[in-house]
Image (cartoon, rainbow, N blue to C red):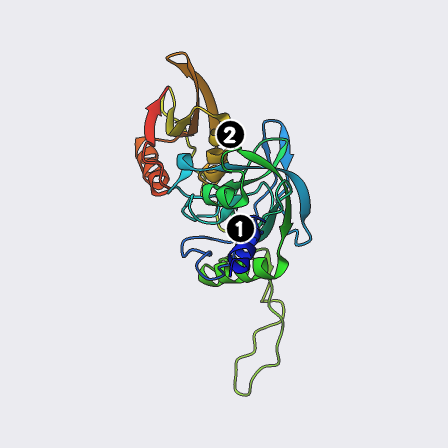
Amino acid sequence: MLGAPLALAACATQNPAVVAPPILTSQAAPESIYKVGTPYQVEGIWYYPAEDYAYVQEGIASWYGTDFHGKRTANGDRYDMNALTAAHPTLPMPSVVKVTNLDNGTTLKVTVNDRGPFHSKRIIDVSKKAAQLLGFYDKGTARVRVEIDPEESLTLKNIAMAKRPPQMPQIAAVPRGVVSASDLAPLPGSVTVPAGTIRPVSVPPPAATPAKPVTPASGGIFVQAGAFSEEANARKLEQQLAEFGAVHIVPTTVNKKKLYRVRLGPVADAGAATALVNKIKGYGYNDAKVVRE
């Protein structure tokens, strides 16, 4: 009778790999969008987002948690540090990757829905929960292999695009150039117009409306989205807010502590700045405010 408990105990000490079942429907949140993005530069390093369904790479993984919990990710999801998600510099969002901790053999599937980490030696930033399951939460980093799952990634792409399909381009049909008339055979009983009476008519294109110049107010109006003690966190927010306009990282020192302020602008006027603050607060950054310089 003692054999069975001993056998179970022996199995329990082998630390079997943890494989999380993929969640295909709920991972693509209603507000999320499918996004690849354009090349961008962070701290002198260029990143080239692409649909790479053969992606496999080994390197260092890290994790991020409370600083971004509840805030928007780069593709519009709400970051949940207790969900199985990750940030990657170039893979499509959302996509599914298998992360293997090379130090202990543990494997976990996570959904990429954010950008980062912006560190030359790190290839992926997983959620707090994922780091706990992979066994490197306390250590902070681990050597990992990251492999994209093409089938599940394409499924998430289709789900996200079905919820928010891309807009069709607007085609404007405007008559331009010369409009000419051809001689046609007269209808019975009609009046014949002498030849040479109909001539080409030149129709000028519609006059373009001059663009209204945007001039920042004196001194400059900016929107400060947040301030961080770690530059990597500021860089992550910089990528998340890129769609709203020019984003700047402004280093400063407060009480002998280094801070990295994330600002957008200059903005045209106070009304535009207020509207931008409200958008950023919708991303979960409730400390967003208007600043003047």
Numbered-mark total: 2
The answer to which image quadrant residue 81 occupies is: top left
**Please, is residue 226 above or below residue 188 in the view?**
above
Is residue 67 left or right of 54 when viewed as pictured?
A: left
The residue indicated by pointer 1 is: 110
Q: Tag 1, which secondary structure?
A: strand
Residue positioned 45% across, 59% down in the render? 164
Closer-to-camera residue (202/146)? 146
Is residue 204 left or right of 257 when viewed as pictured?
A: right
Closer-to-camera residue (269/19)? 19
**Please, is residue 99 above or below residue 21 in the view?**
above
Residue positioned 60% across, 33% down in the render? 41
Q: Is residue 219 visible?
A: yes
How far from the left and from the top, in percent, is residue 128?
A: 46, 41
How far from the left and from the top, in percent, is residue 212?
A: 42, 36
Query: Label 1 vs label 2: CA separation?
Result: 21 Å
Label 1 vs 2, first from the N-terminus: 1
In front: label 1 or label 2:
1
Residue positioned 63% across, 40% down in the render? 103
- Marking on residue 232: 2
Circle 1 packing at 10 Å, graded few (<14), some (14-19), many (20+), is many
The answer to which image quadrant residue 283 occupies is: top left
How far from the left and from the top, in percent, is residue 254?
A: 38, 15
Residue found at the far bottom of this picture: 188
Classify the position of the C terminus by image quarter: top left
Closer-to-camera residue (263/205)? 263
How far from the left and from the top, in percent, is residue 9?
A: 53, 52
Circle 2 packing at 10 Å, graded few (<14), some (14-19), many (20+), is some
Amino acid carrying label 2: it is: Ala
